[in-house]
Amino acid sequence: MFRMQKRGEMPKTKIVAIRILAIILALVAAAFIILLLKLNPVDVYIAMVKGAFGSVYRVKEVIIKTIPLVVTSLGIAIAFKMQFWNIGGEGQICMGAFLASYVALNYPDLPKPLLISIMILASIIGGGLWATVPAYFKAKWRTNETIITLMMNYIALKWIQYLQYGPWKDPKAMGFPKIPHFTDNAILPDLFGVHIGWVFALVLTVLIYIFLNYTKKGFEIAVLGESENTAAYAGINIKRTIITAIFLSGGLCGLTGMIQASALHNTLSVEVSGGVGFTAIITTWLSALKPFVIVIVSLLFAALVQGGSFIQTAFGIPQAAAQLLQGMILFFVLGSEFFIRYKLVWNKSFQSISKKE
Amino acid sequence: MSYIAMKGITKIFGDVVANDNINLQVEAGEIHALLGENGAGKSTLVNMLSGIYSPDSGSIFIRDQEVKLTSPRAALELGIGMIHQHFKLVEIMTAQENIMLGQKNGIFLNKKAHAAKIKALSERFQLGVDPDKKVYDMSVGEKQTLEILKVLYRGADILILDEPTAVLTPQETEKLFKIVKKMKEEGCAVIFITHKMNEVMAIADRITVLRKGKTIQTLDKTTTSPKELAELMVGHPLDLSIDRVQVPQGEVTLQVKNINAKNVEGIEVLRNISFHIRSGEILGIAGIAGSGQKELCEAIAGLFPLESGDILFNNESLVGKSPREIITCGITMSFVPEDRLGMGLVASMDIVDNMILKSYQNDKGLFIDRKKAAEKAKKIVKKLDISTPGIHHPIRQLSGGNIQKVLLGRELDSDPKLLITAYPVRGLDINVSYKIYDLINEEKEKGVAILFVGEDLDVLLELCDRIMVLCNGEVTGIIDAAKTTKDELGLMMAGEKKQYLEGTEIV
Amino acid sequence: MDATISFLAAAIVAGTPLLFATLGEIITEKVGNLNLGVEGMMLMGAIIGFKTALVTHSPIIALLTSMLAGAAGALIYAVLTVSFRANQVVTGLTLTTFGTGFAGFLGQNLVGQVVPATVKSFFRPFAFPGLSKIPVLGEIFFQQDIFVYLSYLSVFIVGVYLYKTSFGLNVRAVGENPGAADVASINTTFYKYFHILLGGALCGLGGAYLSLVYIPVWQNNVTAGRGWIAVALVIFAIWNPYKAVIGSYLFGGLDIIGFRIQDTSFPVSMYFLDMLPYIVTVVILVVISFRKSKENAPPQGLGNPYFREER
């Protein structure tokens, strides 16, 4: 019989080794599914890697998919650091995209730098305010934020749907429910062949790293995440810290919305969030809330998706396979956390329980 | 034949050896006290007897049968019932529902059948439990009685009580003792965990003393004395004298005027409390745990809202000020709670970050300056002899005593004008405790006004200039420490009111 | 009048998948586990039920396998959160990702296929003997298919189980205070596993209702967010299976009202009606939190792992 025992701190290299082992195990488990399809798993995996990194075009696609994950994960990391379970990334992305689009559609003729700056600001405000609603309830009445942020995703999504099918519908689209394209001034420029969002992502990574580790606000967020009592004791203004941090968290998600709407879709649509808000929760968690790790994990996730769509064409494997594989890898990694925190001890002297006579 | 025998029990948590080769024997019809300081391993030991933990090595015999207690259920099947320090009750359920939990009789709930049995038991032991009362409406004493009824109902004949009196009023303690004696008459074995000598002498037949996770000795009450027990408990002959430093007292630093406060449940926790402290004076606070000590400390620090009354610091009102502003005034509060980490420290952070916890807001600009803090951390580690792998090590991994030193070190280093410290030596060994008393005296000599909340009456008597006794949120007296006795304090802790010291009320 | 009755009867049909999933999530949350994988488990139940129906032409086997599929999803969740003590929110979300992938993967080549006739006819509405003759109510509630009658029975069984049996008492104790349940000799691990799996099975049934009865043609993502509504409904129902009935039918009605009002001059956009379940949930959560009532609060232990030797 096994018994669990809490471990002391584990060396970092060993933690990394356990995580990698978990990913390998997930790939092995997934290999059985691939075998069921009568395909060679090794071929499929190699094809996935090729599909993600095999050409300049594919690498660019991966980077384009990485950008929203990084920006959103950074936002979510701020919230998680404070033990605020913001699972409302989807909604915040939508609302950020909404406000940015409002600017883009109403002031299409502003000079490009100005228009884009205003759009960025608008998206941060949109996502930030949307996130502030649950933050306010949390600060005021300790309302559980998990479900509220989740529910607000769908409210935001329905709102975008309403706009797309209603007041913002493009009259020139002959009844097709789409919102008019942005003018060129509202579209993010490219740099080295990929839209400039990648620069945003990298700069933000550094900024958020500094913010979380070297600023007073970052310190307050960490203290508050550990214990509200300690925060009060240290004289931290709890309500203000919650609201500021969550505004930032939502603001970053909102910025993702602007990047996606402007650079990727060139307009607002219900697809603007595309599940990024949810995937980012997972990438953030796997990165242990560390900004630089977020970049790596997001890149791997994007590669997985890109590789997944490649094997669909190459082997006729359903695209959903990538999602399935994502799920499996996550399950294994989540399970492996346990072995980092606990150890199992084999109880040699274990015998059956003697009953009362 | 002995009822319970634990032989060579060892239990290790992470790097801490909580129990090291412990032996314990309890007979039927016996009240057996487990005596030891906090952290001596008493709770760990009984938790293995009740199936909460399993020992890493060693064996347990019940009625001479070797047993493996792998779960509370297994323990209970052998008749072992445990009353935990923190009650294990479901708040939203009634007393009866709590009793019925986990019982196997029939698929459907048969409240009537249970009710009759509950009533019979309750009457037999004179427990007076109302079966339909919801637990969240119960007082602490009622909850404890319910816990006892719960295990009796399950047919326990070995009852383990873990520090049962810490949260009780004297009347409730009396009642508890009656129940325990009744159980003894019925032939049950009772294990009673405590660190209070008077309780041991009042109720135990035999006493096993634990120290630092080891069995020291098992003695008969009739052949021992409180002094001997105390010495066994701490490990060396006791010279319990602490010097009361004589310092000329200065101006009134803190004046508390008729403060009242209610907790979230709307229960009055501070009732019309008034006192003052002068600079260079130590005011001790005595009282049963939970008599309002925590709320009082927090109220002064601005963490607990007042209903009415005023708190003056150097003649300036603190009421309405934020905790931040109060810290800047030069008031420092360190409350060491039972789990030691509590609110003063951040467990996952290192010593440096814990140093800046209360000072970082004084840094200019957006960023945090860790350089100064690192020097301070090094200084404190050296001064208080904190054993740690380094100043950048999460404090969660330090031992309890060292964690406490980090807290006190930081608070004392901040050059306070008013030092509030509650249970600063909780769980520390004697030598470190004395070191801390010295530090407190040093502050006194500097002219700091000190509010010292303590558990040990001897310490309070020797260290403090005056002692204020709290009972149930009320002041039952403020007396000169040099002119009182433990008995007198004990009566006041139990609620007997004494005249305020002359000159206490400042006009 | 007839239009109203037919609308209400249709609301029940639309609410039935929600009802199953909500019951499942209530049971799960009652033992202290927040499983955000409802959507995933419903999809797993939907695809497996559908596929089994195609292969076996047996409605009963299809129902059983859909339950197994939902429970299998829940098993992954239970192993990770109960035994491995992983974060419940992240694990639940991952289960949704996994379940969506799973259904998409298996269903790729089934899109557009129709439920076999034998199965279809099995789930045809029929007048329940006796009860259907009750005026109005009989027409609304007892002219339904057998699956709907099964949902009535499930509500009743879950209600009695939670409130009238000793197991139900234990379930509530595990969710409120696992430490208390543990010392009361309740096997908390078993209780958690069993009820998380049971919850998953019910979610699987909810998915099967969608793919076999409600929309008997396979389409990708057949649940279309209903799993999340179920999570919301648990709060709407304040963790009470009887109140879940009201909530499910209400939200079922909202689900179909959009189609019905398109041809009237109703002034509110259907998108705002679609928002309602979510808005109502937010409002209820906020109200619960500021009233601080002990009785209508979520289970105390919800979301926290339990480990006896924690210290």
Image (cartoon, grey):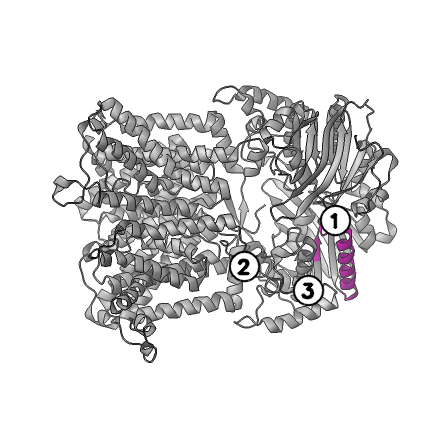
Circle 2 sits on which residue? C173
Residue C291 lies, in percent from the top left, at 51, 50
Circle 1 sits on which residue? B194
- Please give the name of the residue rendered at 60% of the width and 31% of the height, measured from the top-left corner: B323
Tag 2 near tag 1, CB within 8 Å: no
**What is the residue that sits farthest to the bottom in this orientation?**
C130
Circle 3 sits on which residue? B152
Side of C113 where A352 appears, left or right: right
Q: Nearer the viewer, residue C264 or C41?
A: C264
Q: Are marks 1 and 3 on the same chain?
A: yes
Tag 3 near tag 2, CB within 8 Å: no
Q: Nearer the viewer, residue B400 or C277?
A: C277
User: Comparing marks 2 and 1, which lies closer to the viewer?
Assistant: 2
Q: State how far apart marks 2 and 1 are (Cα).
A: 29 Å
Circle 2 marks a residue in which chain? C
Q: Nearer the viewer, residue B203 or C203?
A: C203
Tell me which amino acid carries mark 1.
Thr
- Please give the name of the residue rendered at 44% of the width and 57% of the height, measured from the top-left corner: C28
- Tell me if residue C84 is in the magenta stretch: no
Residue B265 lies, in percent from the top left, at 61, 49
Q: Is residue A172 above or below residue A344?
A: above
SS state under label 1 = strand
Q: Residues within 10 Å of mark 3 (few under 14, many from 20)?
A: many
